[in-house]
Amino acid sequence: MASCSWAENILQLLRKMNNFYLPGSRRSSCFRFEIEGAQVGWIPPHVASLLARYPDVFSPPHQGAVTLCHSLDSYEKRSEAVSHVVQALRQEPSLTCLKGWRDEKYSVMPRFADCPLMWMERAATSLFGVKRYGVHINGYTVSDRQEVCMWLARRSHTKQTYPGLLDNMAAGGLAAGVGIKHTLVKECQEEACVPAAIAKRARPVATVSYTYEDEEGVFPESQFVFDLELPLEFKPRIGDGEVQEFYLLPIDKVKELLATDDFKPNSAMVVLDFLIRHSYIDPDTGLWVFAKCPHLKNRLTASVLSLLSFQSHTIRTL
């Protein structure tokens, strides 16, 4: 039987990716970010103090919430006003997230199905705790003997975030006004040179959601997950330079790497979801080993139990 070490490492990953809702986080001191009475994010106190410099854009905190001024009553007005503020905040040395400016617009809305209320520069979203959405593709092969292998990417060492770590075959953020399927095909083509005709075969299988905090802010995220079975003769190729190398690995090796620091954390969550859905984690020797490890049993959180649900091919609540 496997020891607790693999399961404990996975639990640490899950806790890290959901630490905003765990004891000791800054959640209780954050302000709700509200637009038209609906919450769209979380603003840390040090960010709220900086926003007080811009009374024509942000109203003073009231009853635990920061709102936009009433005069900003349209998508365009909100987007433009907040963009000017964020541009000015780039001069603040403490806001390190803005050093990774992307010139990418992300939609801001209470839920994914809601109409966007404004757009925001991707690099600034963590300052406002705005939920970000992305698309992740599990590329895999099935041999004649039904042996499954997964294609993993090694991120380029020049990437702004998580350089050199293992990643899904292809993945990317969902930009404002761009659809999920379009993003899927685009990222497959650009990152792994997967032809559109093959990429379009990908099956929507799940979403993986989490909220974590670090020194750069609050990160609520949901990833739309697709499984893409690739022809045995197909090999991904480096496209836009965001990938250093591709590996085709047996599932057992993927599972082993998952519990190391060599994986981009949110991509590790996506791979874990794949392993659970496809029954590659044995209930006797996998994550359910927590029940047999007394020192871990009481540390299970609702977020962990949610991810470990047996609901295969189910889109989780966003």
Image: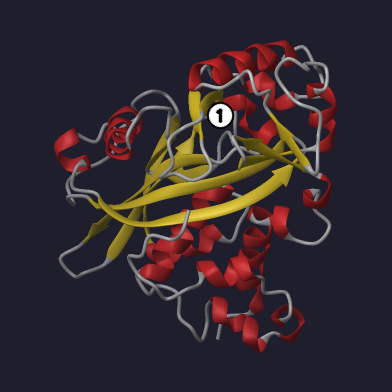
Q: Is residue 166 above or below residue 242?
A: below
Looking at the picture, tell me which residue is in the foreground, 169 or 276.
276
Helix, strand or loop under label 1: loop
Q: Is residue 18 left or right of residue 268?
A: right
Q: Which residue is mark 1?
A: 157
Q: Is residue 211 above or below residue 297?
A: above
Looking at the picture, tell me which residue is in the foreground, 20 or 8.
20
Q: Residues within 10 Å of mark 1 (few under 14, many from 20)?
A: some
Q: Amino acid at mark 1?
A: His
Q: Position of residue 207 (x, y in %)?
A: 42, 55
Quarter holding residue 51: top right
Q: Position of residue 266 (x, y in %)?
A: 54, 49
Residue drawn at (81%, 18%) of the image: 93
Residue 158 can be seen in this image: no
Q: Is residue 303 above or below residue 298?
A: above
Quarter holding residue 100: top right
Q: Is residue 168 left or right of residue 213?
A: left
Q: Position of residue 295 (x, y in %)?
A: 77, 81
Residue drawn at (17%, 50%) of the image: 231
Residue 210 can be seen in this image: yes
Looking at the picture, tell me which residue is in the foreground, 180 or 142.
180
